[in-house]
């Protein structure tokens, strides 16, 4: 194993421990791992890194205790009207790192060149996934920025809205022939995501997949019928 790979595994273990620490006490983690609380505390705080052998042993031991979908559902907050807030998910860096690792693993064989999303909430998820894939992230904006000469443009009408929205993507963001993974935190009606596909195709690039943290209602099934590439979400909400 290369030195870089070894360090990455150790950092992954620290992320796993930090995530588990939100649900388990140090005493419980000590019983699970057989390690002293003081040692676990040093790992969680990043003060000490375990050996490569211990890292592999602990990952094999601890990963079965983590269910990404369940962890995401636990963090989604609903108000009395049924609207939800997913910021507790997006702001949990340990959880997002593990989620991105899982998602990236599904697209390694698709040779992704870029991750594309729309401002603003999709940027967090997109950044984590792009980092795991080792590629750049680009994102479409709702306004043209000064300093950018040319844009790709895609307009759409949001559901239950009488206004036309337009997404703008700088010409330099995507190149002809690039393979693009489109991501977003939530898909409700699909108009924004369809606009991202349109922007990708305008650039002569190729969409190779869509991933969403949350899909609402039956929209995912409808979107899947329109495209010949994988379209999926981690969880579905009614």
Image (tube, rainbow, N blue to C red):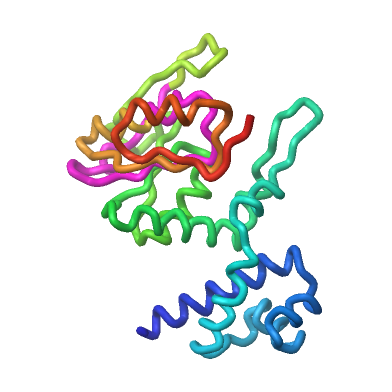
Can the viewer see residue 36 in this picture?
A: yes
* Quadrant location, the N terminus: bottom left
Position of residue 126 measured from the top left corner of the image (x, y, whole percent)? 46, 49
Above-or-below relation of 194 to 123: above
Position of residue 156 measured from the top left corner of the image (x, y, whole percent)? 42, 19
Position of residue 65 measured from the top left corner of the image (x, y, whole percent)? 65, 66
The quadrant in which residue 225 appears is top left
Q: Say whether residue 145 is left or right of residue 111.
A: right
Number of residue marks: 0
Above-or-below relation of 222 to 89: above
The quadrant in which residue 211 appears is top left
Q: Say whether residue 160 is left or right of residue 42.
A: left
Can the viewer see residue 149 in this picture?
A: no
Of residues 83 and 135, which is closer to you in this image? 83
Above-or-below relation of 55 to 145: below
Residue sitting at x 54%, y 61%: 98
Task: Write the start and end of the magenta stretch as one range.
Answer: 166-195
* Quadrant location, the C terminus: top right
Residue sitting at x 35%, y 38%: 147
Position of residue 209 measured from the top left corner of the image (x, y, whole percent)? 35, 42
Q: Magenta stretch: residue 81 in it?
A: no
Residue sitting at x 23%, y 35%: 203
Residue sitting at x 66%, y 69%: 18
């Amino acid at each position: 194993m290369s030195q870089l790979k070894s360090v990455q595994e150790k950092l992954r273990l620290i992320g796993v421990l930090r995530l588990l620490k939100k649900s388990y006490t140090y005493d419980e983690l000590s019983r699970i791992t057989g390690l002293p609380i003081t040692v676990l505390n040093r790992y969680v705080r990043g003060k000490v890194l375990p050996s490569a052998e211990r890292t592999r042993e602990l990952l094999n031991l601890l990963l079965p205790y983590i269910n990404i979908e369940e962890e995401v559902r636990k963090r989604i907050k609903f108000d009395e009207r049924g609207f939800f807030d997913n910021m507790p998910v997006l702001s949990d860096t340990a959880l997002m790192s593990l989620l991105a690792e899982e998602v990236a693993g599904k697209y390694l064989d698709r040779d992704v060149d870029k991750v594309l999303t729309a401002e603003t909430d999709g940027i967090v998820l997109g950044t984590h996934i792009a980092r795991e894939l080792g590629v750049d992230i680009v994102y479409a904006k709702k306004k043209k920025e000064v300093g950018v000469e040319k844009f790709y443009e895609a307009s759409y009408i949001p559901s239950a809205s009488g206004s036309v929205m337009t997404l703008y993507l700088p010409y330099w963001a995507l190149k002809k022939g690039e393979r693009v993974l489109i991501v977003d935190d939530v898909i409700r009606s699909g108009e924004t995501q369809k606009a991202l596909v349109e922007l990708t195709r305008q650039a002569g690039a190729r969409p190779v997949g869509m991933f969403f943290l949350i899909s609402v209602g039956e929209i995912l099934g409808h979107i899947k019928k329109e495209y010949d590439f994988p379209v999926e979400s981690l969880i579905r909400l009614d």
